[in-house]
């Protein structure tokens, strides 16, 4: 009964917001609940029998969390998790509003949460996770974090908070530095078997003497197109990833190591392989949707290395490409650090920062047909262009443009993605 009034107020707020903005409405209701019932989050996350599992880092959190949750559920666990992008404090409160009963109680055996690298350190000061997976540190949101070293410091706090298991990326020197600050704390490692591919993943430089990489218990052995082979504690599995690129293979390795540690003797590698082989992508990460009867691929880019990796992994011969960069790129000058040589001709450039994107692409020889900051006009013009001959239409967008375009087209739920 203690949280009944707060839950009712939060849900009314959620309904009101979604009447105005279909598919939105998580941030404000979550913020309202956090103000009137701040203790509900700690109380909720402390009550799961199998504890709290945290996935954090600069990039790969959403995909890794989705994979880990899917494997846990395939093994019969009832999981409480947060939707992708709801990875800051008000998003956690919003997840409680969505999943709890009217008294604020949430069912489940384990909580598996994707956490923003800045907010995770704040949360673990109050709730100690049983298991922590840290993906990497890349140069991202420099207007917010200023320097990747600050992200590394925050992640070190999260790493030290793990009560049982700490899992980290063996190929990121930032995480090896974190491990050095915790002598005696055991770490489980994942990474690439062939270290020659590490540089392309764009982990932030540390400007310190290189630390020798530890031996990974789960490692990516081979990737051809979307087909990946991963060794998990000496046993190999092969399956098709939901999205293209080595960065998604690393996410799968992190999820498999996380599941192995979380489930212990219950872990069934073949069941995990089958689960990942049939898992759809996280929305907008290689998601294919049907718009007016034709397939369209959505590709999310969020920072320089994310943009570079996704452009580098585009299939050859793409036609009908739209590039949209929104308000979330507070300093779009980072586009100039990206080499677009593998980007096919771009028909339309749009979003709040369309002019900056146009300048960057024209410098590299691209001649878009339309450049406008009006997303709706851009989408309508692009959809009216003749159909491609040998590929599907492709939208490459930043997070702000992604949310606006998906909402405009009626894709309001992150759970509606299929493979």
Image (spheres, rainbow, N blue to C red):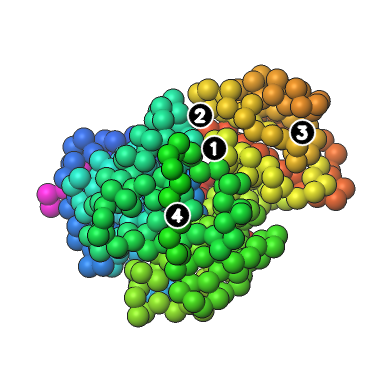
Residue drawn at the location 80% of the way across and 26% of the way down: 365
- Per the image, the residue denoted by label 4 is 212
Instruction: In this rendered view, identify the residue nearer to me: 153 or 46.
Output: 153
- Per the image, the residue denoted by label 1 is 302
Tell me how far mark 2 sits from mark 1, CA to CA: 9 Å
* Few, some or many residues within 10 Å of mark 3 (<14, 14–19, 20+): many
Does residue 88 appear to the left or right of 362 in the view shown?
A: left
Residue drawn at the location 77% of the way across and 33% of the way down: 346
Tell me how far mark 1 sits from mark 3, CA to CA: 19 Å
- Per the image, the residue denoted by label 2 is 328
- Label 2–label 1 contact, CB within 8 A: yes
Magenta-drawn stretch contains 80: no
- Label 1–label 4 contact, CB within 8 A: no
Which SS class for mark 1? Answer: loop
- Per the image, the residue denoted by label 3 is 346
Tell me how far mark 1 sits from mark 4, CA to CA: 29 Å
Which SS class for mark 3? Answer: strand
Does label 3 or label 4 sit earlier along the sequence?
4
Span of residues in magenta: 1-6
């Amino acid at each position: 009964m203690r949280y009944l009034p707060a839950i009712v107020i939060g849900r009314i707020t959620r309904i009101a917001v979604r009447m105005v903005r279909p598919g939105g409405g998580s941030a404000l209701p979550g913020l309202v609940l956090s103000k009137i019932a701040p203790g509900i989050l700690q109380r909720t996350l402390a009550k799961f029998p199998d504890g709290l599992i945290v996935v954090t880092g600069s990039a790969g959190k959403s995909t890794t969390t989705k994979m880990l949750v899917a494997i846990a559920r395939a093994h019969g666990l009832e999981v409480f998790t947060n939707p992708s992008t709801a990875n800051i404090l008000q998003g956690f409160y919003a997840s409680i509003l969505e999943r709890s009963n009217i008294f604020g109680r949430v069912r489940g055996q384990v909580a598996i949460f994707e956490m923003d690298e800045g907010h995770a350190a704040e949360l673990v000061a109050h709730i100690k996770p049983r298991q922590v997976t840290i993906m990497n540190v890349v140069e991202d949101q420099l207007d917010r974090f200023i320097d990747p070293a600050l992200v590394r410091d925050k992640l070190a706090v999260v790493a030290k908070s793990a009560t049982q298991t700490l899992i980290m990326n063996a190929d990121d020197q930032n995480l090896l530095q974190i491990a050095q600050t915790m002598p005696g704390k055991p770490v489980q490692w994942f990474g690439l078997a062939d270290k020659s591919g590490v540089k392309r993943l764009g982990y932030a430089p540390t400007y310190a003497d290189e630390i020798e990489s530890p031996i990974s218990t789960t490692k990516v052995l081979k990737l051809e197109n979307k087909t990946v082979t991963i060794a998990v504690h000496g046993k190999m599995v092969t399956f098709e990833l939901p999205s293209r690129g080595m960065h998604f293979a690393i996410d799968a390795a992190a999820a498999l190591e996380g599941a192995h540690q979380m489930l212990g003797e219950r872990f069934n590698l073949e069941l995990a392989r089958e689960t990942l082989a049939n898992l759809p992508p996280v929305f907008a990460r290689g998601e294919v949707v049907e718009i007016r009867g034709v397939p369209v691929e959505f590709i999310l880019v969020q920072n320089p290395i994310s943009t570079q990796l996704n452009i580098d992994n585009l299939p050859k011969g793409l036609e009908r490409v739209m590039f949209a960069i929104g308000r979330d790129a507070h300093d779009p000058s980072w586009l100039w650090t990206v080499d677009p040589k593998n980007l096919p001709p771009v028909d339309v450039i749009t979003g709040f920062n369309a002019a900056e994107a146009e300048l960057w692409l024209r410098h590299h020889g691209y001649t878009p047909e339309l450049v406008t900051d009006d997303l709706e006009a851009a989408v309508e013009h692009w959809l009216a262009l003749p159909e491609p001959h040998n590929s599907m239409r492709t939208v490459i967008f930043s997070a702000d443009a992604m949310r606006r375009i998906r909402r405009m087209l009626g894709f309001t739920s992150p759970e509606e993605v299929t493979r």
